[in-house]
Image (cartoon, rainbow, N blue to C red):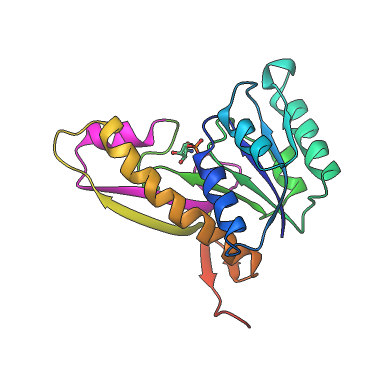
Amino acid sequence: LPIAVLVSGGGSNLQSIIDRVEQGALDVDIRLVVSNKGDAYGLERAKKHNIPHKVLLHTDYATREAFDADMVKAINDAGVDSSGAVVLAGFMRIITPVFLSAFENRVINIHPALLPSFPGAHGQPDAADYGVKISGCTVHFVDEKTDHGPIIIQAAVPALAGETGDELGPRILKLEHRVFPQALQWLAEDRLELDGRFVRLKPAGK
Ligand code: GRF
């Protein structure tokens, strides 16, 4: 499956995908890594593994739509279209219908909380500060609402009384590195069947 990975930061989720591919356990071909930040460490990771990478600064664009149109073009030019997939791996920009219509039901995101609880940019501290006993991560298809689309997989960790987002976050991130490549492999195997809000996992090899 040809994919593009969008990052804004450290790219540890990108790394988990790269590692699985190199282990032969994930059937995707990372055609392009795009960052909306020039100094994202995710770009270094791409470089190290000889993966094409590109910086597109959202600040260079007047509108989200214009930015998204250029991202679509870059991704298409790299050989990823609506039969491939786009992976949001810590990409901290809201994407618009301009982007989604180019990759219908082919964009997946990871969120560091158990949706629909604690959407937004601060999932880990929001959950920790609220005093939940369980948090985790969610991989979902992206739709036009932030952190909202049909859920592919979730995984949970205990949250401890009084801990901060900085303490809870790394445990969630460890889970992210397991479930994101898993979700992507299901997509690569064409095992995810969308039915409204529901995602059914088809049996392997059918
Ligand atoms: C992860 O916690 C992800 O869930 C969130 O942003 C963080 C990105 O981490 N959307 P990394 O850049 O993959 O290390």
Which one is nearer the viewer's eye here, 98 or 53?
53
At a point 56% along the width and 57% down the height, the residue shown is 20
- On screen, residue 6 versus residue 178, left or right, reads right
Q: In the rendered view of the protein, which quadrant contains the C terminus?
A: bottom right
From the top left corner, tell me how far across and down residue 61 is, in percent. 74, 19
Quarter of the image where one finds residue 118? top left
From the top left corner, tell me how far across and down residue 73 is, in percent. 83, 37
At a point 38% along the width and 47% down the height, the residue shown is 174
At a point 65% along the width and 69% down the height, the residue shown is 190
At a point 33% along the width and 37% down the height, the residue shown is 169
- Count of marks overlaid on the render: 0
Which one is nearer the viewer's eye here, 87 or 171?
171
Q: Is residue 123 magenta?
A: yes
Q: Is residue 64 visible?
A: yes
Furthest residue in direction front, as rendered: 48
Q: Is residue 197 visible?
A: no
Image vertical order of residue 60 relative to residue 136, above or below: above
Furthest residue in direction left, as rendered: 161
Q: Is residue 206 magenta?
A: no
Furthest residue in direction right, as rendered: 77
Q: In the rendered view of the protein, which quadrant contains the N terminus?
A: bottom right
Which one is nearer the viewer's eye here, 110 or 34?
34
- On screen, residue 164 versus residue 184, left or right, reads left
Image vertical order of residue 167 relative to residue 202, above or below: above
From the top left corner, tell me how far across and down residue 103 is, in percent. 73, 50
From the top left corner, tell me how far across and down residue 146 is, in percent. 53, 39
Q: Which residues are magenta?
A: 122-148
